[in-house]
């Protein structure tokens, strides 16, 4: 992702909550600061979910535009990051639904190496195999795996992001891991 313009006028050091409050009041410079601090992570998350750089750019841009439009309605300013992640995941899901075909998934090495234990057996560790297996998953399963294994979000944070109970997030993560294991088995068999 191309870096955002760094010619933002200097602001006094403020907390994120203060920046969120100011942005909610229409302060574009405060909102730009929030975006700059979160743009790379948001793009990385979108790219891991969607597997396509162009689609990830579109989803990330749509998420930030939606956040700007909806920010005045955010009640709990301290939950800005979870709220923004929810908007991003929804933008990715909308982008995923709008596709005519599924792009090849290009997982970065961080996802493969971040927590391979529950996902990848010793015999199937090739990142191409993992990427093909990941491509077999629907967007909802991809999203929860990316949030947990790539973004290193704890279950409580994922539950907050997705607007679901923690137990449901745990169950969905377990289901997504099982689906990925099945997909890895299929891809592993295809290599033989």
Image: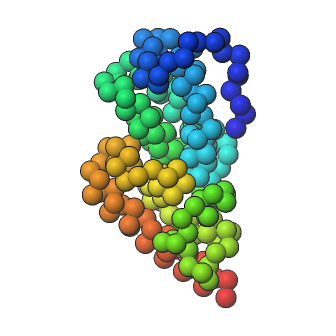
Q: Residue at x 47, y 25 (%)?
A: 16
User: 99 or 48: nearer the eye?
Assistant: 48
- What x and y, as percent, mark residue 173? 39, 61
Q: Would residue 78 appear left or right of 69 to someone viewing this image?
A: left
Q: Residue 58 appears in which quarter of the rendering? A: top right
Report which quarter residue 82 is drawn in: top left
Left or right: 56 with respect to 158? right
Choose between 70 and 30: the one closer to the eye.
30
Q: Residue at x 58, y 41 (%)?
A: 41
Quadrant containing the N terminus is top right
Which residue is at a point 51% across and 58% down the rendered structure image?
A: 149
Q: Residue furthest bottom?
A: 192
* Quadrant (top left, top right, bottom left, bottom right) of the C terminus: bottom right
Is residue 155 visible in the rendered image? The answer is yes
Give coordinates of residue 101: x percent, y percent.
Answer: 60, 55
Point out residue 134 in the picture as x, y percentages from the top left corner: 56, 64
From the viewer's side, name the closer residue of 8 and 175.
8
Which residue is at 27% across, 58% downward?
167
In the image, residue 37 sits, relative to residue 88, either above or below, namely above
Is residue 96 visible in the rendered image? The answer is no
Relative vertical location of residue 23 with respect to residue 179 in this rendering, above or below: above
Residue lying farthest to the front in this orientation: 13
């Amino acid at each position: 992702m191309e870096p955002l313009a760094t010619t933002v006028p200097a602001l006094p050091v403020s907390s994120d909550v203060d920046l969120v409050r100011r942005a909610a009041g229409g302060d574009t410079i405060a909102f730009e600061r929030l975006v700059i601090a979160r743009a790379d992570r948001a793009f990385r998350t979108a790219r891991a979910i969607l597997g396509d750089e162009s689609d990830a750019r579109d989803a990330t841009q749509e998420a930030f535009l939606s956040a700007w439009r909806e920010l005045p309605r955010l009640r709990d300013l301290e939950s800005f990051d979870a709220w923004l992640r929810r908007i991003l995941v929804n933008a990715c899901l909308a982008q995923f639904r709008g596709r005519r075909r599924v792009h090849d998934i290009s997982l970065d090495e961080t996802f493969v190496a971040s927590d391979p234990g529950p996902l990848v057996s010793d015999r199937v560790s090739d990142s191409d195999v993992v990427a093909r297996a990941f491509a077999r998953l629907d967007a909802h399963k991809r999203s929860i795996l990316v949030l947990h294994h790539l973004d290193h979000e704890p279950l409580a944070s994922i539950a907050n992001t997705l607007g679901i109970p923690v137990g449901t997030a745990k169950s969905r993560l377990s289901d997504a891991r099982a689906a990925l294991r099945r997909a890895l088995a299929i891809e592993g068999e295809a290599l033989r």
